[in-house]
Image: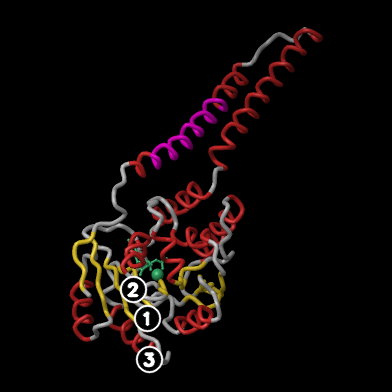
Amino acid sequence: MISLIFPTYNEEGNLAELHRQLREATASIEGQLFEFIFVDDCSSDRTPEILRQLHEQDERVKIIRFARNCGSHAAISAGLNECRGAGAVVLAADLQDPPEIIGQLINEWKAGGKIVWGLRAGREGESFLTKALANLYYRVMNWLTIVKMPPKGADVFLADRVAIDAFKQFSEKYTSIFMTFAWLGFPQRNVEYVKAARYRGESKWTWGKKFKLALDSLLSFSDIPVRYMSVLGFITALLGFAYALFVFWKYVFFGVPVQGWSSLIIAILVVGGVQMTMLGVLGEYLWRTFEESRKRPVYVVEYKID
Ligand code: UDP
Ligand code: MG
């Protein structure tokens, strides 16, 4: 059996059409059983009712409902923790990742891939800024972190049971699931697809959430910020020292009196600014350490229907 996992948040307009397309796409894959796990991330629209109806029509539809909105990565974790398939595919519930890709992913899985990425060969209905920033995110992550992600990014993947079981050992909260899977190793393969525009409704990935994910990804897979704090501090100190020597030299050899309210202020501002930034970086690590040490659950389940 293959588990299809859908993080779902306020997708009332998409679910019926998604289910129709899923029925078609899975019927064309012969000899393969499926379960459809919808993880309802505490939707406030008619999503829960629609999911119950789908469950009544189709016993393959299973529901996990969160008691609070925990974010799509938490929803994906819940799906992966609960799924029973020999492999699982993670797809968005807004039809941006067309269900036809499931067949392609399964073929590469059968050919030996333990993790199969659906790479975005193109994106429809997305603004230039969104695309540019997404590309920047993947570039910066590949450059600064120990994980290599597909350069154009992936929103869809298939994971074999061995990779799912390996993933289940992780209990981190402040991280990116996609980067965790990329980090795991295993034979990884790719298929390409064009990411469609949203079928109905609005994207829930606000700029704030995207920024938080970028910071989480960076801090959980790179030590560069905390490492280079001391390098930056050292360089600043060196510059200050060089300037002091320069002033001293001018005074001794040319009799130029030590002057300059401006240079004083500049020095104070630069040093102060650098220190504040570094405190901020330390704070980010400290906050994450504190949060992880409280061992709060990644998500809270209200009910499960299967
Ligand atoms: N999603 C979720 N919880 C959230 C936000 C989004 O489960 O807090 C789901 C959403 O229903 C969708 C998927 O995550 O199935 C991707 O979200 P969205 O389409 O809003 O993001 P985008 O495609 O714009 O990146
Ligand atoms: Mg979407």
Compared to 56, does 219 lie above or below?
above
| Among the two numbered marks 2 and 3 on one chain, the one whose residue lies closer to the N terminus | 3
Q: What residue does disc 3 label?
A: 27
Residue 53's tag is none
N-term-proximal mark, 1 vs 3: 1
Tell which circle, 2 or 1, labels the residue nearer the N-terminal end: 1
Quadrant (top left, top right, bottom left, bottom right) of the C terminus: bottom left
Q: Give the image quadrant in which the ligand numbered 1 is located.
A: bottom left
Image quarter for residue 41?
bottom left
Name the residue tied to disc 2: 84
| Horizontal and vertical percent position of residue 294 | 31, 42
- Looking at the figure, which quarter contains the N terminus? bottom left
Q: Residue at x 65, y 22 (%)?
A: 240
Residue of label 1: 1
SS class, disc 1: loop
> What is the three-letter code of the residue carrying label 1?
Met
Marker count (numbered): 3
Q: Are marks 2 and 1 in contact (CB under 8 Å)?
A: yes
Q: Residues within 10 Å of mark 1 (few under 14, many from 20)?
A: some
Residue 299 location (% of width, % of height): 28, 56
CA gap between label 2 and label 1 equals 8 Å
Quarter-wise, where is residue 21 in the image? bottom left
**Label 3 beta carbon less than 8 Å to ligand 1:** no
Indicate the amino acid at tag 2. Arg
Circle 2 or circle 3, nearest the eye: 2
Q: Determine whether, in the image, residue 10 is placed left or right of residue 123.
A: left
Give the magenta part as a residue range.
Answer: 270-289
- C-alpha separation, residue under disc 1 versus residue under disc 3: 13 Å
Amino acid type for the residue under numbered disc 3: Ala
